[in-house]
Image (cartoon, grey):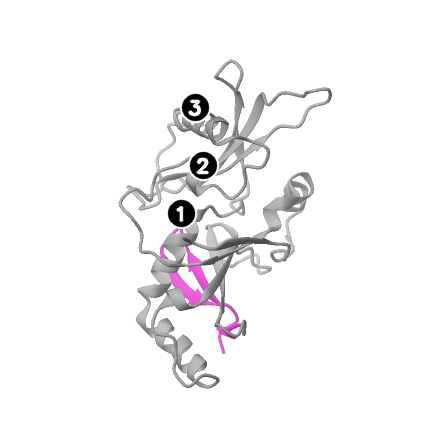
Amino acid sequence: MMHRIMDTIMTNPASNNSHQHLRAAYPHWGLRLTRRFTACLCAGMLSVFATGLSFAAGLSLEQQNTAGSIAAAVPWPTARALSDSHPLGSQTLSIEKQERKNQRDVRYINVYQYNYPQRAARLVVIDLQDGTLLKESSIASVHLPLNDIEIDYAISLLVNSTNLMESLKREHVKRSAQPFSSIDELDVKASIYEPRDKDHACQYDRCALLSLFDNTNTVFTIEPVINLSNLSVSVLNPR
């Protein structure tokens, strides 16, 4: 079973005021996920709803699935897609109960989604009681939380980067008799990467920053940056 721990380490501070506003309204968006990657991507990895969500506190599995199903059926704007296709398609990133004064029952739900072919993010508000769509609005920032599907895909791109994997093994052998043979021997901490450099591609693309730890809990100095939008792999602060 995959190991997943919520951690309170925050991502890089946003340089854009709108991003700061989003974090103030939804503070959990800065949380990083720690997990041990133990399996390859499966055929059903592109499914949405509860299995891949980064955050769904206060909601039952049935409520998450209902809200996710309604949101997934809402068509995206008919604007021309920036790419013909993308392996991640449209992703449901998080499903959250909307807090309202004097509201005791779970009724209004916020569903955050990202469309990779269109490179667009949106908020879909669902009335769970009536099973209806209340509102759909676009979100300017791409720096929404990663879901599990995106994290798994980012790690798979790292695994397929032969040169980077060899660099990680060379670093590991400096402090270990034997370098790791598989990524599932490491703990991987993944977070949405928001660079300070305004000209960096990850200002506009969804990118995952991966921090790797060996069995002694020592962090690797090499931190892969996986651009999930264009499927490229690089490193943070290359030497």
**Element on which disc 2 rests:** helix
**Residue 2 location, quadrant:** bottom left
The residues tagged by marks 1 and 3 sit, at their Cα atoms, a distance apart of: 20 Å
Q: Give the image location of residue 159, x and y in percent.
A: 34, 65
Residue 59, relative to residue 40: is it above or below? above
- The answer to whether the residues at label 3 and label 2 have Cβ atoms under 8 Å apart is no
Q: Position of residue 168 (x, y in %)?
A: 41, 75
Sequence-first disc among 1 and 3? 3
Vertically, is 103 above or below 32?
above
| Foreground tag (1 vs 2) | 2
Q: Residue at x 69, y 42 (%)?
A: 24
Residue at point 54% right, 47% down? 143
Please tell me which residue is depicted at 41% across the width and 86% down the height of the picture: 177
Q: Residue furthest top?
A: 130
Q: Secondary structure at mark 3?
A: helix
Mark linked to residue 123 = none
Q: Which residue is mark 1?
A: 149
Asked if the stretch drawn in magenta spans residue 152, the answer is: no
Measure the alpha-carbon separation of dots 1 and 2.
11 Å
Region rendered in magenta: 219-239
Residue 231 relative to residue 130: left or right: left
Query: What residue lies at 35% left-to-right and 60% top-to-bottom?
Result: 157
The residue beneath circle 3 is: 70
Whether residue 213 is visible: yes
Say which amino acid is labelled 1: Ile
Q: Nearer the viewer, residue 67 or 81?
A: 67
